[in-house]
Image: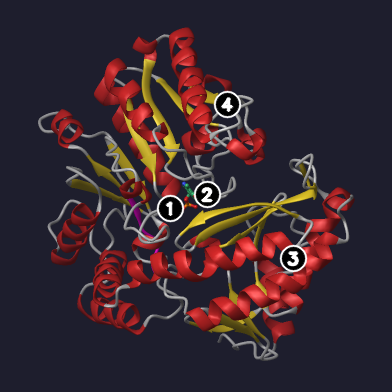
């Protein structure tokens, strides 16, 4: 029989015995043993509480253990735990209806997956079959998942060990004014030059060979890079002109994170395919999917769609999505994210930036914010080099440790810390977290020059 470990040390020892962790050197990791979680907090076996300013992997938009979502999973488990995708299941149809209603424009058919990477895989497959073309363009400074096509599309170092040259993927530079690839000095220049760069890349790759352009509406892990006005509309126009499918990856930015249902709603841009996961049900049960335009759905009206998953539209996952989306509407959770971002997080972070030598730029929307940390505000040299590891990453490692000592669980990537609490976070919780962040930034200040 299974003896439930009762101490943090025992839980950790059991983990180290058999669990193989993602993205990690197995012999050097030291995972925190978690005893429980509720709302914006989780705690360990010694009773130390952490305010979750990471929403785990930016997915618990509704917070931990939301009672309505927990109850919906329990109820569905008592009714029908699992059923193959080929059958009509009430809760699956309702989840699809609610997702279709929430997504922008005329996206009306929903293909369910188990998570974000599979959503990207299937969106790319749909685009290739719809156009009869092979190449897919994606941005540097992006993350699209860890399966074959998704990792090749990714524009960060996680791609390097899994690169397959034949994947037909070409990377381009998206807009990022603070570290402009185009020597731009204004948002207008950045948008215009990023579009000109993309247009030229398409001309040299051959538009007739390009199936799709995939973009995170707001690149998330890469630094919460808010696109300048006109950029996404410009990409939409380029896609239309060349018959290229426009895929927006809203796996991280979607379902309330930016203070709207989808980040695309901020610019009223409608993609042909939209990938989602994470916030659709806050990850209570694995779920992702692709929202599909009528034109692409029509391609597969009489021709079979050649893709599927045993757990596509899993009843427990769909029940948790239905409960999540309904609770978000009933409790004004998306509105909370918008208000707290506009009135509390944004102003407070800008004020923090003025007081700390290490904060180069603050950017964000809703509960989706990044601090770009620098050695020197004048030169904008990042606090640690790109993809730093070991001793070179000491300033960020010390900063993260200082946050945790203060009871704040941060989201740290390269030279950035992201402020990405649940969409349900309260003003008092935000203030508590920002006070801890403020303290921890002093540790990073010690590594600045000038
Ligand atoms: N796309 C984006 C924008 C993401 O942020 C992620 C995960 O962080 C993914 C895709 C991959 O999702 P998953 O880890 O559920 O496969």
Q: Secondary structure at mark 2?
A: loop
Q: Measured along the vertical axis of the image, is residue 384 above or below residue 36?
A: above
Disc 3 or disc 4, which is closer to the eye? Answer: 3
Q: Earlier in the sequence, mark 1 or mark 2?
A: 2
Circle 4/circle 1 CB separation < 8 Å:
no
Give neighbour class at mark 1: few <14, some 14-19, many 20+ (Cα, 10 Å).
many
Q: Identify which residue, 310 or 400, lies in the foreground.
A: 400
Q: CA distance from mark 4 to mark 2?
A: 24 Å
Q: CA distance from mark 3 to mark 4?
A: 34 Å
Q: Earlier in the sequence, mark 3 or mark 2?
A: 2
Residue 220 marker: 2
Find out whether residue 167 is within the magenta segment: no
Where in the figure is residue 325, as x and y percent of width and height? 27, 67
Horizontally, residue 349 falls left or right of residue 283, namely right
Q: Secondary structure at mark 3?
A: helix
Disc 4 or disc 2, which is closer to the eye? Answer: 2
- Tell me the quarter of the image containing the N terminus: bottom right
Range covered by the magenta-colored residues: 285-289
Q: CA distance from mark 1 to mark 2?
A: 7 Å
Name the residue beneath numbered marker 4: 164
Name the residue beneath numbered marker 3: 400
Q: Identify which residue, 263 or 248, lies in the foreground.
A: 263
Q: Of helix, strand and loop, which mostly describes the magenta segment?
A: loop
Name the residue beneath numbered marker 1: 253
């Amino acid at each position: 029989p299974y003896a439930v470990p009762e101490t943090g040390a025992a839980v950790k020892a059991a983990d180290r015995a058999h669990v193989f962790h993602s993205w990690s050197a197995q012999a050097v990791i030291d995972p925190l043993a978690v005893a429980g979680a509720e709302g914006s907090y989780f705690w360990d076996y010694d009773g130390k509480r952490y305010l979750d300013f990471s929403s785990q992997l930016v997915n618990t938009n509704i917070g931990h253990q939301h009672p309505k979502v927990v109850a919906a999973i329990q109820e569905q488990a008592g009714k029908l735990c699992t059923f193959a995708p080929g059958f009509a299941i009430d809760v699956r149809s309702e989840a699809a209806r609610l997702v279709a209603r929430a997504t922008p424009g005329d996206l009306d058919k929903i293909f369910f997956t188990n998570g974000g990477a599979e959503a990207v895989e299937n969106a790319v497959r749909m685009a290739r079959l719809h156009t009869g073309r092979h190449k897919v363009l994606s941005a540097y400074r992006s993350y699209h998942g860890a399966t074959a096509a998704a990792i090749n599309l990714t524009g960060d170092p996680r791609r390097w060990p899994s690169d397959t040259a034949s994947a037909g993927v070409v990377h381009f530079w998206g807009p990022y004014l603070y570290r402009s690839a185009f020597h731009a000095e204004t948002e207008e220049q950045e948008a215009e030059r990023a579009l000109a760069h993309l247009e030229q890349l398409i001309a040299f790759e051959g538009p007739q060979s390009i199936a799709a352009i995939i973009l995170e509406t707001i690149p998330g892990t890469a630094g919460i890079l808010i696109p300048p006005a006109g950029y996404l509309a410009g990409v939409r126009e380029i896609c239309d002109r060349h018959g290229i499918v426009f895929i927006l990856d809203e796996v991280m930015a979607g379902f309330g994170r930016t203070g709207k249902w989808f980040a695309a709603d901020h610019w009223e841009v409608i993609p042909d395919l939209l990938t989602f996961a994470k916030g659709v049900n806050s990850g209570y049960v694995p779920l992702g999917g692709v929202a599909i335009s009528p034109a692409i759905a029509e391609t597969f009206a009489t021709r079979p769609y050649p893709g599927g998953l045993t757990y596509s539209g899993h009843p427990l996952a769909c029940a948790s999505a239905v409960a999540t989306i309904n609770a978000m509407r009933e409790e004004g959770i998306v509105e909370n994210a918008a208000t707290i971002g506009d009135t509390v997080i944004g102003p407070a972070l800008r004020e923090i930036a003025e007081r700390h030598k290490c904060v180069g730029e603050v950017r964000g929307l809703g509960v989706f914010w990044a601090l770009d940390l620098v050695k020197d505000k004048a030169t904008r040299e990042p606090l640690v080099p790109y993809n730093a590891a070991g001793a070179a990453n000491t300033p960020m490692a010390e900063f993260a440790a200082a946050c945790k000592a203060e009871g704040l669980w941060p989201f740290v990537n390269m030279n950035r810390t992201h402020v990405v609490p649940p969409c349900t976070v309260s003003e008092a919780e935000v203030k508590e977290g920002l006070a801890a962040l403020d303290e921890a930034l002093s540790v990073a200040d010690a590594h600045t020059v000038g």
